[in-house]
Amino acid sequence: MEKVNAIGRRKAAVARVYLTEGNGQIVINKRPFDVYFPSSILQYVVMQPLNTLEAAGKYDILVHLDGGGFKGQAEALRLAIARALVKINPEDKAALRAEGFMTRDARTVERKKPGQPKARKRFQFSKR
């Protein structure tokens, strides 16, 4: 099997993933998986597509993550891994879609408007 690549985005985060056959090693920005994501919740989020297909120890994953925060990066990585797994085996798409891993979450931060302190917050109103 050759190298399979995919991209995933969430909020401001972009994850580029390169999958090869291996023993389950995940390297993110030249750091080990458990060092980059010390939180067990974020580790679980990233591993969801692999655990759904029982493919956790089959592939080595090289990741380039950029932008966003921890949660956005973890969810972008989850989407990228799911897309790469579908490129390898298209029959897996139905199982991953049923779990919701194939859908790009398009929600982003609303822009700040002029004359306001934040996107929706207004300055205090004074009648006199």
Image (cartoon, rainbow, N blue to C red):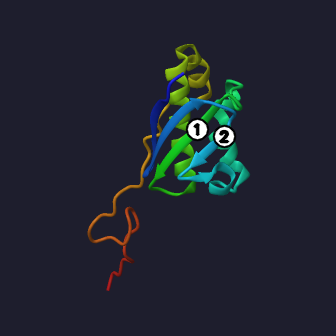
Mark 2 residue crowding within 10 angstroms, few (<14) / some (14–19) / many (20+): some
In this view, the residue in front, 125 or 38, is 38
Q: In this view, does 92 lie above or below 69?
A: above
**Label located before the other in sequence (1 or 2):** 2
Mark 1 residue crowding within 10 angstroms, few (<14) / some (14–19) / many (20+): many
Q: Is residue 120 visible?
A: yes
Q: In this view, does 116 lie above or below 22?
A: below
Identify which residue is drawn at 55% across, 34% down: 81
* Residue denoted by label 2: 25
Identify which residue is drawn at 52% across, 57% down: 69
SS assignment at label 2? loop
Q: Give the residue type that dot 2 points to.
A: Gln
Residue 116: percent from the left, percent from the top?
33, 70
Q: Is residue 11 left or right of residue 45?
A: left
Identify which residue is drawn at 41% across, 67% down: 121
Q: In this view, does 97 lie to the left or right of 56?
A: left
* Residue denoted by label 1: 61
Marks 1/2 in contact by CB < 8 Å: the verdict is yes
Residue 83: percent from the left, percent from the top?
50, 29
Q: Give the residue type that dot 1 points to.
A: Ile
SS assignment at label 1? strand
Residue 40: percent from the left, percent from the top?
73, 51
